[in-house]
Image (spheres, rainbow, N blue to C red):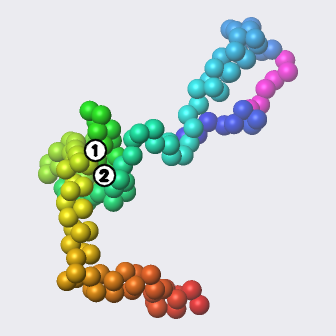
Amino acid sequence: MRWNESSNWVRSNELTHEPLITARQWDAVQAIFTSNKRRTGVRPTLEGRKYILMGLVRCGACGRRMEGNWNNGKAHYRCQVRRDDPVDRGLHPRTIYLKEATILPHVDSWVTELFDDDPLDHTAELLAAASEPDSDEIARRK
């Protein structure tokens, strides 16, 4: 169910009953409603609230992407199960929080290992392969 745009409303020029409010009151209320409409799209991140792993962290219980959440002055990632979510709620806690500060040292350690002397050649090969176009993708485009 959607509301019709006001431009599609049909109004009668003749009064069929006495109005409950004046035209001036109507216009004042419409101005308030118009100013309170929410903007669509993605909200910009508040100043100082940066999520280094935004879009990359997945929930270990359900596999869904975790959303950034500012909690107690620090960056966290959160997976929240609501009543209408198609997730088995019996196995998933209602909310799972993961501190970004807990994850980052492990990510740093992993990246450092990738660029150590021993696996460096293999890492370079993987990076080079990732930058080359996929032959299957090229064939599909033709």
Residue at the spot x=84%, y=17% of the render?
14
Q: Is residue 58 visible?
A: yes
Residue at the spot x=21%, y=72% of the render?
113
Q: Nearer the viewer, residue 2 or 66?
A: 66
Residue 53, magenta (yes or no): no
According to the picture, the residue beneath numbered tag 1 turns out to be: 76
- SS assignment for the magenta stretch, majority: loop
Q: Secondary structure at mark 2?
A: loop
Residue at the front extreme, as displayed: 117
Image coords of residue 129 (percent x, y)? 39, 86
Q: Is residue 89 visible?
A: no
According to the picture, the residue beneath numbered tag 2 turns out to be: 66
Q: Secondary structure at mark 1?
A: strand
Please name the amino acid that badge 1 sits on: His
Quarter of the image where the C terminus is located: bottom right
> Quick one: label 1 or label 2, which is nearer the N terminus?
2
Question: Image height check: is 6 above or below 136?
Answer: above
Q: Residues within 10 Å of mark 1 (few under 14, many from 20)?
A: many
Mark 1 to mark 2: distance in Å? 9 Å
Please name the amino acid that badge 2 sits on: Met
Question: Image height check: is 29 above or below 47?
Answer: above
Q: Which residues are magenta?
A: 9-14
Residue at the left extreme, as displayed: 91
Image coords of residue 103 (percent x, y)? 22, 54
Q: Quadrant of residue 38?
A: top right
Image coords of residue 82 (percent x, y)? 28, 42
Q: Residues within 10 Å of mark 2 (few under 14, many from 20)?
A: many
Q: Nearer the viewer, residue 105 or 140?
A: 105
Q: Viewed as shown, does residue 32 lie left or right of 76?
A: right
Residue at the spot x=24%, y=69% of the render?
112
- State yes or no: discs 1 and 2 in contact (Cβ < 8 Å): no
From the viewer's perspective, is the residue at label 1 or at label 2 nearer? 1
